[in-house]
Structures are given as structure tokens and as C-alpha cells.
Image (cartoon, rainbow, N blue to C red):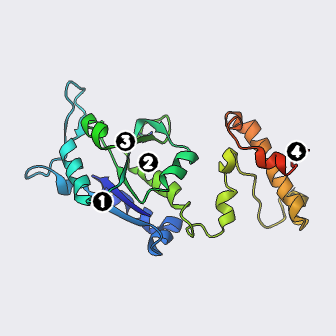
């Protein structure tokens, strides 16, 4: 999968793209990420990429032309995502759907945002990572890259870790424990030490359902329970 990031602050991405799981995915060629400096498409001697908001509060807005030139220079059909608080809220379902695109372009706004004519004519999906306001689209872009990259086959070691994680089937993950089996008088649930795979699976599913019910009941309505019921986990 190929991802191109258009940003006025490419330095944000350097260590992110070299670190941990995303870094390994890039190193192994499972994920190709290019970071394009928007200043290279700026206008005039000062390579201007933003200007004052018309009729606005004096805030700066990224201009449509430098963004469009950067996009046109890619010369490749792509799916364009623009992170903004006005967008549709990112969910695991959306992550899954955008992870199927061959080439994803993420346009990072800054200051007050991006000229709406660019958004209206060039952007396929405006995406929010939550109901709060950040200073720019770089952190949301990293959230998108991180969440998408772990779905690329081979990026996360054990296939199981991905499919059993939170939001698979729309439910929260079960709790996890590691050694020692007893820590400061607190014991690991005995079933996890039993070696009984069926019982362990049953425990994990029950924990997942009960956590979802208590912590995020809103998710329950949409969760896929068919598999649970078919396997008799709740009888
Ligand atoms: N840019 C600024 N705030 C944002 C948010 N909450 N989500 C996505 N992009 C943003």
C-alpha cells in the first residue's frame, strides 16, 4: 500500500515513520509512505502556501493552488483524505475501508484549515479523529497511517492479534496479563493458566462482551454477535 502525505511540516513524520511497527512495515516494503513538503509548491519568493481567511477572524487558510499542484504532481489515481474536526468520525470500519485503497493521499491542514473549494473538488473523505480541535492535520494523519498499516497483511506479527483486538466484531478487547502469574497479591485469572484452549476462548469472549456492555454500551447495538451465539458462548 502507498500513502502520500501533503504537509507544511514534514519533520513531524520523520521519527514516526522510522519507529516500531510502522517503521518496520516501511523498512520491509509492506508500506510505502512519501511525505511531500507543501512549501515546494508555494507561490512567490517566499513560497507562500497560506493566506488570510476572507471575511474571517484574521486566521490563516491553506490556499487551494499549492495543494492542487502537489496533488497533480503525484500523477497517480488516489483516494484523498483530509483530516478536519468537521469530518466524519474515524471508526475501525472506516479504517478497514480506506486500507483497501492502493494509494491514499492525506492532506494536512494547518492554521484555520484549507480553502473549501479544494475540499469540495479534490477531497474524497473529510475525517475527524474526535470531537476536539488540534493545531493541524499531522497527528490525525499519523493516526490514519498507524491504524491502516496494522491491517496490511504481514505488518502485525500474529494474524490473531489483529483480528482479536478491540473493535473486531465491533466489541472491546478482553484484558491481557503477562508474567508473573502473581504480582503484589494479585493473581492472573486461573483459566488463563489452565492450558484449556476452549475454556480460555470462552473466557476471552465473555470478558469482551461484558467490557463492551459496561464501558461502551453504545457499541453493543452494532456489534456482531452471530459468531458468539452460534458457538454457544452464552448458553
Ligand atoms: N484537525 C484539527 N483537529 C482535528 C481533529 N479532531 N480531527 C481531524 N483533524 C483535525
The answer to which image quadrant residue 135 occupies is top left
What is the number of the mark on residue 140? 2
Q: Quadrant of the N terminus?
A: bottom left
Q: Measure the C-alpha gap from mark 3 to mark 2.
A: 10 Å
Give me the residue at 52% from left, 55% from top.
147
In this view, 89 is above or below 21: above
Mark in the foreground, 1 or 3 = 1
In this rendered view, identify the residue nearer to me: 38 or 94.
94
CA gap between label 3 and label 4 equals: 46 Å
Q: Secondary structure at mark 3?
A: loop
Q: Which residue is mark 3?
A: 135
Asked if the residues shown at circle 2 and circle 1 are in contact, with their CB atoms under 8 angstroms apart, the answer is no
Q: Earlier in the sequence, mark 3 or mark 2?
A: 3
Q: Is residue 55 visible?
A: yes
Which residue matches tag 1? 76
Residue 67 in the image: state x and y as whole percent: 24, 48
Please, what secondary structure does the residue beneath circle 2 have? helix
The CA distance from mark 1 to mark 3 is 29 Å
Observer-side mark, 1 or 4, equals 1
In the image, is the residue at mark 3 within 8 Å of ligand 1 by its beta carbon? yes
Q: Residue 36 location in percent, x, y? A: 28, 59
Query: Which residue: 56% across, 60% down?
Result: 151
Tell me, yes or no, whether the two marked residues, 3 and 2, touch with CB atoms within 8 Å: no
Relative to 68, residue 216 above or below? above
Give residue 168's position: percent from left, percent from top. 66, 51
Q: Which mark is residue 166?
A: none
Pointers 3 and 4 in contact (C-beta within 8 Å): no
Q: Estimate how packed mark 3 is, as few (under 14), some (14 to 19) or many (20 or more) residues with alpha carbons within 10 Å.
A: few
C-beta proximity under 8 Å, tags 2 and 4: no
Report which residue position mark 4 lands on. Answer: 234
Q: Nearer the viewer, mark 3 or mark 4?
A: 4
Where's the C terminus, which quadrant? Answer: top right
Amino acid at each position: 500500500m502507498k500513502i502520500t502525505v501533503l504537509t507544511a511540516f514534514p519533520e513531524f513524520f520523520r521519527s514516526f515513520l522510522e519507529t516500531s511497527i510502522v517503521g518496520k512495515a516501511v523498512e520491509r516494503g509492506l508500506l510505502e509512505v512519501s511525505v511531500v513538503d507543501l512549501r515546494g509548491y508555494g507561490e512567490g519568493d517566499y513560497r507562500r502556501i497560506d493566506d488570510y481567511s476572507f471575511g474571517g477572524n484574521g486566521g490563516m487558510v491553506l490556499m487551494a493552488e499549492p495543494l492542487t499542484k502537489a496533488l497533480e504532481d503525484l500523477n497517480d489515481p488516489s483516494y484523498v483524505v483530509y483530516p478536519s474536526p468537521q469530518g466524519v468520525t474515524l471508526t475501525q470500519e472506516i479504517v478497514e475501508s480506506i486500507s483497501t485503497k492502493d494509494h491514499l493521499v492525506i492532506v494536512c491542514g494547518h492554521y484555520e484549515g484549507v480553502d473549501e473549494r479544494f475540499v469540495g473538488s479534490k477531497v474524497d473523505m473529510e475525517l475527524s479523529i474526535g470531537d476536539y480541535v488540534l493545531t493541524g492535520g499531522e497527528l490525525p494523519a499519523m493516526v490514519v497511517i498507524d491504524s491502516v498499516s496494522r491491517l496490511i497483511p504481514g505488518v502485525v506479527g500474529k494474524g490473531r492479534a489483529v483480528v482479536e483486538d478491540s473493535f473486531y466484531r465491533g466489541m472491546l478487547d478482553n484484558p491481557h496479563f503477562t508474567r508473573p502469574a502473581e504480582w503484589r497479591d494479585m493473581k492472573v485469572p486461573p483459566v488463563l493458566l489452565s492450558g484449556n484452549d476452549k475454556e480460555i476462548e470462552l473466557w476471552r469472549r465473555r470478558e469482551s462482551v461484558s467490557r463492551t456492555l459496561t464501558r461502551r454500551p453504545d457499541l453493543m447495538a452494532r456489534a456482531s454477535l452471530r459468531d458468539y451465539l452460534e458457538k454457544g458462548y452464552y448458553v
